[in-house]
Amino acid sequence: MKWPLSLCEAGSGEERRQMASSSSGLTFKLHPLVIVNISDHYTRVKSQLKPPLVPHGSFSNGSDGSFSSATAASSADPSPRVYGCVIGVQRGRTVEIFNSFELLFDPVTHTLERTFLEKKQELYKKVFPNFYVLGWYSTGNDAEESDMHIHKALMDINESPVYVLLNPLINPAQKDLPITIFESELHVIDGIPQLIFVRASYTIETVEAERISVDHVAHLKPSDGGSAATQLAAHLTGMHSAIKMLNSRVRVLHHYLVAMQKGEIACDNSLLRQVSSLLRRLPVIESGKFQDDFLMEYNDTLLITYLAMLTNCSSTMNDLVDKFNTAYDRVSRRGGRAAFI
């Protein structure tokens, strides 16, 4: 059973169905480390979950003897659900989620292991004294009715916790991140005040260390080292994707400017200044100097490739001559012909 969320399906009338986003006015900033942690948590649990699935309502022991969060999966849904807490700081109306840690879940009572939560919170407080528990996370297509019970249970730690939901299903057509942040708001539904989940907008915030780490993970080599051709293909694929994305974004700006020129869209001077500033950053590739530099670099690359092939051929030929001389040297010792060189 799905919990009434963005459309407030439990309410009546078109007015309730329009309450799709949060009205708290908070600004959420999500760091990539949180997404990586949730994805890693889900991947590990799913890889350890082997058929037959753990019966609903029972615990399975983890590697450390503790209860595993993989037991949250039911026989009807082969994808397990994982749970954890998100931590960070709140400065005024800005909520910044920096990190997360895993929690243990009891599928019978639909609650989190409170002792384990308090212990983890105490340990993180020693390392990150400025970080507080901002809410919790889980995985799935959409929030469920049982999620509200967990949400209410965390209100004694944070009176207004946030709920970060990761959709683990791969959708090639989706361009946005499969991450949704929910807030809880008190709405009157059929004359009864009820807490419901409402979607909140967020932005991805990174620091220098996270950018370096994400870039390193994105360029990891295969475990066997991989061939030069494989690494080159991966590099060219990444370059192609980046150029394709840049082309699509520039095309969007072009369509917007054309529509504004035709009068279909109202003129926005501040936005035009931003577009102008952005276009000045794009490289100009139609000049004669660019063609000369490009051809020079292209010829240098071909020359280096040619020299590398010659060096490789020379090395192979030397190996062949050495083997040939070794073979004929043995024959000459037995009274045969002399060595070739």
Image (cartoon, helix red, strand yellow):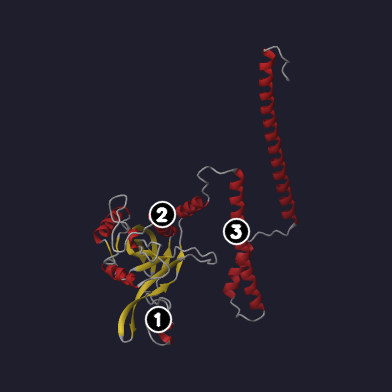
Q: Could you tell me the amino acid type at mark 3?
A: Ser
Q: Mark 3 points at which residue?
A: 241
Of residues 232 and 296, the one nearer the viewer is 232
Q: Are discs 3 and 2 less than 8 Å apart at CB?
A: no
| CA distance for labels 3 and 2 | 29 Å
* Type of amino acid under label 1: Glu
Disc 2, SS? helix
| Viewer-side label of 3, 1 | 1
Q: In which quarter of the image is residue 47?
A: bottom left
**Circle nearer the N terminus (2, 1):** 1
Q: Which residue is drawn at 30% across and 59% down?
A: 104
Q: Is residue 224 left or right of residue 293?
A: left
Determine which of the numbered discs, if any, sits on residue 9 in the image.
1
Vertical comparison of 2 with 89: above or below: below
Q: State the SS at label 3.
A: helix
- Residue denoted by label 2: 47
- Mark 1 is surrounded, within 10 Å at the Cα level, by few (under 14), some (14 to 19) or many (20 or more) other residues, namely some
User: Is residue 33 found left or right of 292 in the rendered image?
Assistant: left
Q: Are marks 2 and 1 in contact (CB under 8 Å)?
A: no
Amino acid type, label 2: Ser
Indicate the quadrant containing the N terminus: top left, top right, bottom left or bottom right: bottom left
The picture places residue 148, in percent across and down from the top left corner, at: 32, 72
Q: Position of residue 149 (x, y in %)?
A: 30, 71
Tell me residue 239's x, y (percent).
Answer: 61, 55
Q: Can residue 131 be seen in this view?
A: no
Depth check: 265 or 224 in front?
Answer: 224
Residue 14 position within the rendered picture, expressed as x and y whole percent measured from the top left: 43, 86
